[in-house]
């Protein structure tokens, strides 16, 4: 019988610790199999081993690492290099297939053979090719990650979406409710984003969203907060560090400042502003739906307060919302009940003192609350769409007034009416206007329609159509609140603009030292250069009227002469005014 040392070099002999049958079973496996003796010297291998490594059993038998001039996969060398001990081992290994260069995966098992006294008697090593199973696992993991990405992330910005936000908000509010850190939810919505899409295109609008998300993400990375993109141009931010409303106010101001920094999109310089609504946890609730709803309410009131502003939710908003709902219901009833009347205010020639024109203004006589200011009901009518029937009513009244005032006179004056953006955007506005003029027996040249500066820049195509229609009718156009909105200077040469109205904020600027504001002076100079009439509104003092007359402003209107009045009262005022002027 050969010794153990001799047997280690005899091919075909069973491995130490294995009988001949057991060795044959192991060596017949389709997996890669090799056997080591108790000193981890190579003893036997099967055909799969030889096919995979390209080395025969005769080349390796009796050897231990390092193998002089022989390359073997690292995991095989690793098994043979283990310290001599009696233990089992299992692992996974990835490597490149030496023939194809593709990545393959093996699951390896080492079986320790023992003598009756527990000392090592050899090892059987098995490497199972698990490449297909591993590939399927990787594909499954990738699919799960992709599904998770679609389910919880916004594809455009890469930010978490509403579903992801709801989960994080539930966690944060639950922790806060049990004594953890207080926090807040910010709902951030870009102002007038639809106008951006309409003027620079949706592709550029998407770039704006990406840029804003980048800016917000940079804020979050510094603070460790959670940022998500919601629908449209809305984002949400969860913060955990707030001790009170002062903290929220500081964060809101910082975010608005960061968002409003100008940037270029396709060689166009854009400035985007946002409005923010905030709710606090646990103060305002302990569930995502409630906190989101309250942040939405705060955002709505922030939007109504003007652009580039913020609002924190409080119980008073609920009362305001209820009052607004009731006022909206009353507004609808009052339109049906004809509780709206036209008031009129004269425009005075600042040089001669003659009445140069009249503006028609809508007033609401509430059956219980009395007169409601336009600053209250006009924005509500705009938001609800009720401005459409109201606009038609004031146009009708203005046409009737113009006919009554001008019919048979040698020197007719124009009656001006403010147009709302919703009216301008109506496809049938020109036919509606023609109907009002025709039914009142009015002449179109007796009307002047006032359009705000920002409206002129909102939809160039629609404004072109409107201007062509008004020009064909012979109706004059005035730009209202000039200098307060977007720059409409290009419109002054592009369209037949009859009048520029200087906003009241520029009238009151420098009255205390008797000097006109630089903006008022510039508007008047530009209007005179272009041959356009200039009207200043909101004049309350004789010094204001005198100041505007000296810089060349043509006309003025305001409380210096009279407040807007119903038609009959206005005619009585006219009689007194003209009598007084004739006596001077």
Image (tube, helix red, strand yellow):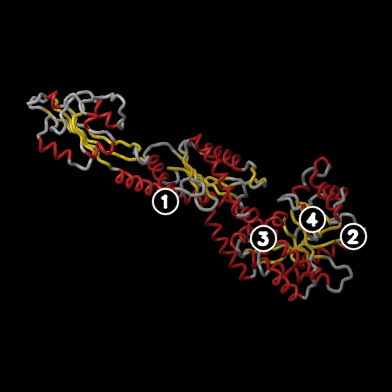
At label 4, counting other C-alpha atoms closer than 10 Å, the crowd grade (few under 14, some 14-19, many 20 or more) is: some
Q: CA distance from mark 1 to mark 3?
A: 39 Å
**Disc 1 secondary structure class:** helix
Q: Within 10 Å of the Cα at label 2, are there few (<14), some (14-19), or many (20+) other Cα atoms?
A: few
Residue 430 drawn at (x, y percent): 71, 69
Look at mark 3 in the image and give the residue it sits on.
421
* Marks 1 and 3, the one that precedes in the sequence: 1
Of labels 4 and 3, earlier in sequence is 3
User: Which residue position holds label 1?
Assistant: 151
Tell which circle, 1 or 2, labels the residue nearer the N-terminal end.
Answer: 1
Q: Is residue 13 above or below residue 539?
A: above
Residue at 14% in and 40% down: 25
Q: Nearer the viewer, mark 1 or mark 4?
A: 1
> Which of the numbered marks, if any, corresponds to residue 581?
2
For mark 1, does the 10 Å Cα neighbourhood hold few (<14), some (14 to 19), or many (20 or more) residues? some
Viewer-nearest of discs 2 and 4: 4
Residue that appears at 47% across and 36% down? 224
- Nearer-N-terminus badge (2/4): 4
Pointer 4 residue:
492
Q: Residue 156 or 141: which is nearer the viewer?
A: 141
Which tag is nearer the camera, tag 4 or tag 3? 4
Of circles 1 and 2, which is in front? 1
Q: Residue at x 86, y 74 (%)?
A: 408
Sequence-wise, the earlier of marks 2 and 3 is 3
Spatial CA distance of label 4 from label 3 is 19 Å
| Mark carried by residue 572 | none
**The quarter of the displayed image where residue 453 is located:** bottom right
| Mark 1–mark 4 distance (CA, rounded to whole Å) | 51 Å
**Tag 2, which secondary structure?**
helix
Task: Find the distance from the CA under tag 2 to the CA under tag 3.
Answer: 39 Å
The location of residue 205, given as percent across then percent down, is 59, 51
């Amino acid at each position: 019988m050969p010794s153990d040392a001799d047997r280690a070099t005899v091919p075909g002999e069973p491995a130490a610790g294995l009988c001949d049958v057991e060795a044959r079973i192991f060596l017949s496996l389709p997996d890669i199999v090799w056997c080591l003796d108790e000193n981890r010297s190579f003893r036997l291998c099967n055909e799969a081993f030889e096919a995979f490594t390209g080395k025969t059993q005769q080349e390796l038998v009796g050897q231990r690492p390092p193998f002089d001039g022989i390359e073997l996969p690292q995991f095989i060398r690793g098994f043979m290099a283990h310290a001599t001990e009696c233990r089992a081992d299992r692992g996974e290994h990835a490597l490149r297939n030496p023939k194809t260069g593709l990545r393959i995966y093996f699951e390896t098992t080492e079986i320790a053979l023992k003598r009756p006294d527990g000392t090592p008697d050899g090892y059987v090593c098995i490497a199972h090719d698990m490449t297909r199973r591993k590939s399927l696992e990787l594909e499954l993991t990738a699919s799960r990650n992709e599904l998770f990405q679609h389910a919880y992330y916004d594809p455009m910005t890469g930010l978490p979406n509403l579903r992801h936000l709801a989960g994080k908000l539930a966690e944060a509010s639950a922790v806060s409710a049990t004594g953890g850190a207080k926090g807040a939810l910010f709902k951030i919505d870009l102002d007038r984003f639809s106008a951006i899409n309409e003027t620079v295109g949706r592709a550029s609008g998407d770039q704006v969203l990406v840029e804003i998300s980048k800016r917000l993400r940079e804020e979050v990375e510094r603070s460790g907060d959670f940022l998500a993109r919601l629908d449209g141009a809305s984002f949400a931010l969860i913060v955990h560090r707030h001790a009170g409303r002062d903290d929220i106010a500081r964060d809101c101001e910082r975010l608005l400042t960061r968002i409003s920094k100008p940037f270029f999109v396709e060689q166009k310089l854009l400035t985007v502003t946002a409005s923010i609504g905030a709710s606090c946890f646990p103060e305002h609730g302990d569930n995502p739906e409630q906190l989101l709803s309250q942040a939405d309410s705060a955002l709505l009131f922030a939007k109504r307060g003007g652009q580039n502003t913020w609002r924190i939710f409080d119980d008073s908003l609920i009362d305001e919302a209820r009052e607004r709902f009731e006022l909206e219901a009353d507004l609808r009833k009052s339109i049906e009940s004809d509780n709206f009347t036209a008031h009129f205010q004269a425009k005075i020639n600042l040089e001669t003192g003659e009445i140069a024109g009249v503006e028609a203004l809508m007033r609401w006589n509430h059956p219980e609350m009395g007169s409601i200011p336009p600053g209250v009901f006009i924005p509500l009518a705009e938001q609800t769409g009720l401005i459409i029937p109201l606009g038609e009513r004031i146009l009708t009244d203005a046409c009737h007034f113009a006919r009554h005032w001008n019919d048979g006179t040698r020197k007719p004056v124009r009656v001006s009416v403010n147009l709302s953006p919703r009216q301008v955007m109506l496809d049938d506005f020109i036919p509606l206007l023609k109907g009002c003029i025709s039914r009142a027996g009015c002449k179109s040249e007796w009307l002047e329609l006032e359009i705000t500066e920002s409206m002129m820049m909102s939809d160039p195509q629609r404004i072109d159509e409107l201007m062509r229609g008004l020009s064909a009718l012979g109706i004059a156009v005035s730009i209202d609140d000039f200098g307060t909105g977007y720059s409409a200077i290009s419109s002054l040469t592009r369209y037949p603009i009859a009048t520029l109205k200087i906003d009241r904020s520029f009238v009151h600027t420098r009255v205390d030292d008797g000097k006109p504001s630089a903006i008022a002076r510039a508007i008047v100079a530009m209007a005179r250069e272009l041959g356009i009439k200039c009207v200043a509104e909101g004049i309350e003092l004789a010094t204001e009227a005198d100041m505007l007359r000296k810089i060349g402003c043509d006309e003025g209107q305001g409380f210096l002469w009279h407040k807007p009045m119903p038609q009959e009262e206005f005619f009585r005022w006219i009689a007194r005014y003209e009598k007084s002027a004739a006596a001077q």
